[in-house]
């Protein structure tokens, strides 16, 4: 979570040809750790000690995704979880306590 040392590591599912991978994180896990409002920044790392790479940066030719790609939130208990693009076009997840 941004501003804390809290991190989650997931092992991706790698395709047989080693050209692609995928991973899934349950929204409930983000809420369980958050306990309050916050933002999760999403990175991938090719191997241990390799630099972190932000997700979402170069998927298309849209220069400013933050105002164009707006996604709905889902409600989990007393928390809302919403994916969004930062001003740098990076993908993050906002976890917010409902008022």
Image: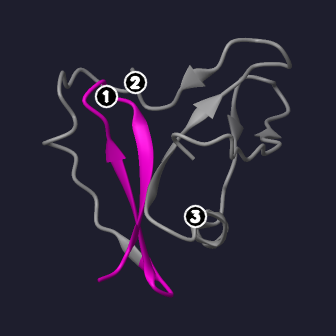
Residue at point 70%, 44% (across, down) = 7
Q: Which residue is mark 1?
A: 89
Give how far apart the Cα atoms at labels 1 and 2 are.
5 Å
Tell me which label, 1 or 2, sits earlier in the chain.
2
Give how far apart the Cα atoms at labels 1 and 3 are.
23 Å
Give the x, y percent position of residue 8.
73, 47
- Between residue 70 and residue 51, name the one nearer to us: 51
Observer-side mark, 3 or 2, equals 3
Tell me which label, 1 or 3, sits earlier in the chain.
3
> Label 2: how many residues lie within 10 Å, few (<14), some (14-19) or many (20+)?
some
Tell me which label, 3 or 2, sits earlier in the chain.
3
Give how far apart the Cα atoms at labels 3 and 2 are.
25 Å
31 relative to 85, above or below: below
77 relative to 64, above or below: below
User: SS at mark 2?
Assistant: loop
Residue at point 86%, 19% (across, down) = 48
Magenta stretch, main secondary structure, is strand
Q: Which residue is mark 3?
A: 34
For residue 65, what is the image quadrant?
Answer: top left
Give the x, y percent position of residue 29.
67, 67
Residue at point 57%, 71% (across, down) = 35
Give the x, y percent position of residue 30.
60, 63
Observer-side mark, 1 or 3, equals 3
> Label 1: how many residues lie within 10 Å, few (<14), some (14-19) or many (20+)?
some
On whether residue 80 falls in the magenta region, the answer is yes
Q: Which residue is mark 2?
A: 57
For residue 49, what is the image quadrant?
Answer: top right
Picture mark count: 3
User: SS at mark 3?
Assistant: helix
Residue at point 45%, 52% (across, down) = 93
95 relative to 80, above or below: above
Direction from residue 84 to residue 56 in the image, left or right: right
């Amino acid at each position: 979570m941004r501003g804390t040392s809290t991190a989650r590591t997931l092992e991706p599912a790698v395709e047989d040809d080693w050209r692609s991978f995928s991973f899934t994180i349950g929204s409930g896990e983000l809420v369980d750790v958050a306990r309050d409002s916050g933002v999760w920044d999403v990175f991938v790392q090719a191997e241990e000690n390799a630099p972190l790479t932000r997700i979402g940066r170069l998927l298309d030719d849209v220069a400013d995704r933050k105002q164009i790609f707006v996604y709905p939130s889902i409600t989990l208990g007393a928390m809302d979880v919403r994916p969004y693009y930062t001003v740098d076009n990076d993908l993050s997840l906002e976890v917010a306590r409902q008022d």
